[in-house]
RNA sequence: GGCUGGGUAGCUCAGCUGGUGAGAGCGCACGACUCAUAAUCGUGAGGUCGAGGGUUCGAUCCCCUCCCCAGCUACCA
């Protein structure tokens, strides 16, 4: 069984989970579920990035020790993932003892490789960095952040020239190897638009990056002291990024999280870290690279860019309560292309819910099962389905398959699009064959059998193919059709035989609300 | 400023290396049907394919200029 080890970015433990976090995790969750149903041995890793100066500061503001603070945030995130049906296999936290030990191990591995290199080639070296430091921000400022010689955020303060002595990582030495990586393996970074940006960056050449910091201590102690004897704190690159690699050092995960990963799902804002710094680190350590990095887009809210400064205007719980978790998952996955950006609005949510879920799919299930009950006592006839319709269905399902692990892979929105085609085509088929008319004359029994089995099979396909998107709702559909066991256990690359199933019409899958909820 | 990708029906978008009448879904209007969650099915509306030039027998798709939008332009993560 082929392995599929996918990861998401670990979320920074500096605030509550919001819509942006949800989009990434739900998308990755769907990708994981689709691969499980195509026979992959899936390991799905997510987690939290819990170190760093900001976390320490926020904890201090709240008046609690940093560990206690991040424990609370982690609980909050995990509760959210449970609520959203994000079925991860492993949840990693960078404050775990196992992670911290493994980070030190990775760094030592690079030092070990350095031992055989001449001094000017070594990956890690000490260097003094001089920059303009804003006391107000407690951080160094880049030229782009400086207005009239002052920090843009604290224009009344004077920037201080501060020198810091750190461990540095010789990222610049990897420019050529990274260019070769992108040239030899174009699918290493997708979608293509993101790859272009990184290629441009590589053309400019890379600067070395700092690997340790002296100004905060909430993190992993850098395993080797500086020549002056000081021990510094491992900087974010070498603490957060390695989580994908350190996951296998947790008890019970040695095989499941075996390196390398198949896919890193990340947001487009951190593409550079995952496709330049991270591969270079792995090269330095002599480790294999992940097979692929996928940089998804962002979701805006009411046309505005989602950001902390604008405030979390949408409570995830509110979005879930309106139409249920499954509908929320469907809306996000269907309306935000995973290779681009999207926008959240209640108007749009309602449109999609009514049109796709209630009218097209929900009503198709409702009318089909009602007819199977009415005309055949609920038993799906043992007949062959309509050839022509299924030839068309097979084309749609081939497109869906391609959007999972073919040339359109990692695009759940295209899987959904293909399945809605199946549902629409089936509604059209009902209109064309008019089973209610066939039922009036017993001479048409065979023809009616064909129609009814065709409907049941079409719906079974919808259930099996959409259960990764809507786990509970599609299981309910599966059960109404009379399917045994879990729809999520069905292989997507194998036909479903529905003959003899006992269908029972239950409550509407996607009821329309009495009155449309008011829009903000 | 530089680089990249875009600007196609009210909305969201398809349109491969240029060629019969420019498409889909949603929304809208009208019609049909009754199995169904007043759902479904059919038909239609006729959009200067961002603006202006150019190449060509012929361009939404090629070239030039301009306008507008988004992203990237590295140590907050």
Image (cartoon, coloured by chain):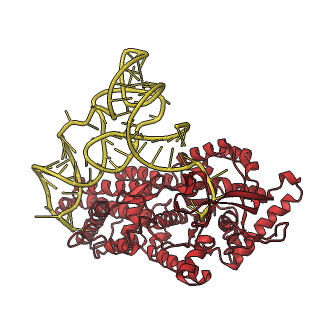
Chain colours: A red, B yellow
Name the quadrant containing residue A232.
bottom right
* Residue found at x 61% / y 80%: A66
Name the quadrant containing residue A515.
bottom left
Name the quadrant containing residue A95.
bottom right
* Residue found at x 62% / y 74%: A92
Q: Quadrant of the N terminus of chain A?
A: bottom right
Q: Quadrant of the C terminus of chain A?
A: bottom left
Q: Is residue A321 visible?
A: yes
Q: In x, y percent, where is residue A373?
A: 26, 72
Q: In x, y percent, where is residue A223?
A: 79, 71
Closer to us: A278 or A475: A278
Position of B32 with respect to B70 (left or right) is left
Position of A240 with respect to A433 (left or right) is right
Closer to us: A494 or B75: B75
Closer to us: A321 or A397: A321
Q: In x, y percent, where is residue A304?
A: 38, 58
């Amino acid at each position: 069984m082929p392995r599929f080890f996918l990861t998401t970015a670990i979320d920074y433990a500096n605030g509550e989970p919001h819509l942006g976090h949800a989009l990434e995790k739900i998308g990755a969750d769907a990708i994981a579920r689709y691969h499980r149903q195509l026979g992959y041995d899936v390991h799905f890793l997510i987690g939290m990035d819990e170190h760093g100066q900001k976390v320490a500061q926020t904890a201090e503001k709240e008046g609690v020790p940093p560990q206690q603070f991040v424990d609370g945030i982690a609980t909050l995130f995990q509760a959210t993932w449970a609520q959203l049906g994000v079925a991860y296999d492993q949840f990693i936290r960078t404050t775990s003892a196992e992670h911290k030990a493994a980070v030190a191990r990775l760094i030592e591995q690079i030092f070990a490789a350095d031992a055989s290199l001449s001094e000017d080639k070594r990956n890690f070296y000490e260097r003094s960095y001089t920059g303009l430091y804003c006391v107000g921000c407690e951080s160094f400022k880049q030229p782009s952040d400086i207005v009239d010689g002052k920090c843009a955020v604290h224009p009344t303060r004077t920037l201080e020239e501060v020198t810091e002595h750190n461990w540095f990582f010789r990222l610049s030495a990897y420019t050529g190897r990274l260019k070769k990586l992108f040239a030899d393996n174009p699918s290493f970074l997708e979608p293509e638009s993101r790859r272009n940006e990184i290629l441009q960056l590589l053309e400019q050449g890379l600067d070395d990056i700092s690997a340790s910091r002296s100004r905060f201590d909430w993190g992993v102690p850098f395993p080797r002291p500086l020549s002056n004897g000081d021990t510094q704190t491992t900087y974010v690159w070498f603490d957060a990024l390695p989580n994908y690699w350190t996951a296998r050092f947790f008890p019970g995960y040695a095989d499941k999280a075996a390196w390398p990963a198949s896919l890193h799902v990340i947001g487009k804002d951190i593409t550079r870290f995952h496709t330049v710094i991270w591969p270079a680190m792995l090269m330095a350590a002599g480790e294999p690279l992940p097979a692929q990095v996928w940089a998804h887009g962002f979701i805006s809210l009411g046309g505005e860019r989602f950001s902390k400064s604008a405030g979390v205007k949408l409570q995830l719980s509110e979005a879930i309560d309106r139409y249920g978790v499954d509908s929320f998952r469907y809306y996000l996955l269907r309306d935000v292309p995973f290779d681009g950006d999207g926008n959240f609005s209640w108007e749009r949510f309602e449109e999609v819910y009514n049109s796709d879920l209630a009218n097209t799919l929900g009503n198709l299930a409702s009318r089909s099962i009602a007819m199977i009950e009415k005309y055949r006592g609920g038993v799906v006839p043992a007949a062959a389905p309509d050839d022509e319709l299924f030839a068309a269905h097979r084309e749609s399902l081939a497109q869906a398959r391609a959007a999972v692990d073919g040339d359109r892979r990692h695009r759940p929105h295209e899987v959904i699009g293909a399945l809605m085609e199946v549902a629409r085509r089936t509604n059209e088929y009902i209109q064309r064959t008019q089973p209610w008319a066939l039922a009036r004359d017993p001479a048409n029994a065979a023809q009616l059998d064909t129609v009814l089995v065709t409907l049941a099979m079409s719906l079974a396909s919808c259930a099996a193919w959409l259960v990764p998107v809507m786990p509970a709702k599609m299981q309910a559909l599966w059960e109404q059709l009379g399917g045994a066991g879990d729809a999520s256990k069905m292989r997507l690359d194998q036909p479903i035989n529905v003959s003899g199933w006992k269908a029972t019409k239950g409550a509407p899958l996607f009821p329309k609300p009495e009155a449309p909820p008011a829009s903000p």
